[in-house]
Image: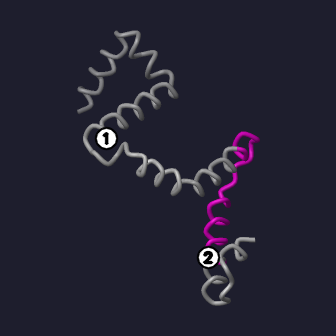
C-alpha cells in the first residue's frame, strides 16, 4: 500500500499540471466538489432539481450563520469553541419556552 502511494506521488511530481493542482488547495477542492456534483447529478435524477437545492439551502441557513460568525472570529485571531455550545444551549432554551411556557416561536427567539 505504501509503495503504491509512493509511486503515485512520483507520477504526480512528474506532471507539472497535477503538481500545481495539488499545491493550490482551493482550486483542488473546487474541482473535487465539481466532480462530485456532476457525478451525483448524473447518477441521481432528484439531485439537481430546484426543490432539492432549495431544501439544502434552507436547511443550511443556521449552519451558514454560525460558520460566518466563526470565520470572523478566526480571521481576527480569536479561537473560540463556545459558538457551537451557545447555539445548542439557545436551541434548548427556546424549545423549553415553546413547550412549557406556551410562548410563540417568534417571541421565544427574541
In the foreground, 30 or 79: 30
Residue 35 percent location from the top left of the image:
35, 31
- The residue drawn where x is 37% and y is 37% is 37
Residue 23 percent location from the top left of the image:
48, 21
With 61 as the anchor, is 70 left or right in this view? Answer: right
Say which element carries label 2. helix
Residue 53 percent location from the top left of the image:
45, 47
Say which element carries label 1. helix
First to last magenta residue range: 72-93
Tell me which label, 1 or 2, sits earlier in the chain. Answer: 1
* Residue 92 is a magenta residue: yes
* Residue 50 is a magenta residue: no
Q: Residues within 10 Å of mark 1 (few under 14, many from 20)?
A: some
With 102 as the anchor, is 19 left or right in this view? Answer: left
Residue 91 percent location from the top left of the image:
62, 72
Disc ID at residue 92: 2
The residue positioned farthest toward the front in the image shown: 50
Residue bearing the label numbered 1: 40
In the foreground, 3 or 21: 21
- The residue drawn where x is 73% and y is 47% is 73
**Could you tell me how far apart the alpha carbons at marks 1 and 2 are, in whole angstroms?**
35 Å
- The residue drawn where x is 34% and y is 9% is 14
Is 102 situated above or below 47?
A: below
* Marker count (numbered): 2
In the foreground, 36 or 110: 110
What predominant SS class does the magenta segment belong to? helix
Q: Is the Cβ of the residue at disc 1 closer than 8 Å to that at disc 2?
A: no
Q: Residues within 10 Å of mark 2 (few under 14, many from 20)?
A: few
Classify the position of the C terminus by image quarter.
Answer: bottom right
- The residue drawn where x is 46% and y is 15% is 20
Amino acid at each position: 500500500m505504501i509503495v503504491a502511494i509512493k509511486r503515485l506521488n512520483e507520477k504526480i511530481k512528474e506532471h507539472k499540471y497535477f503538481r500545481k493542482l495539488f499545491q493550490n488547495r482551493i482550486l483542488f477542492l473546487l474541482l473535487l466538489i465539481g466532480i462530485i456534483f456532476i457525478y451525483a447529478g448524473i447518477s441521481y435524477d432528484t439531485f439537481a432539481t430546484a426543490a432539492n437545492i432549495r431544501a439544502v439551502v434552507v436547511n443550511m441557513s443556521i449552519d451558514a450563520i454560525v460558520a460566518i460568525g466563526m470565520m470572523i472570529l478566526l480571521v481576527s485571531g480569536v479561537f473560540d469553541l463556545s459558538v457551537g455550545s451557545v447555539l445548542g444551549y439557545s436551541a434548548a432554551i427556546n424549545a423549553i419556552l415553546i413547550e412549557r411556557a406556551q410562548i410563540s416561536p417568534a417571541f421565544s427567539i427574541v
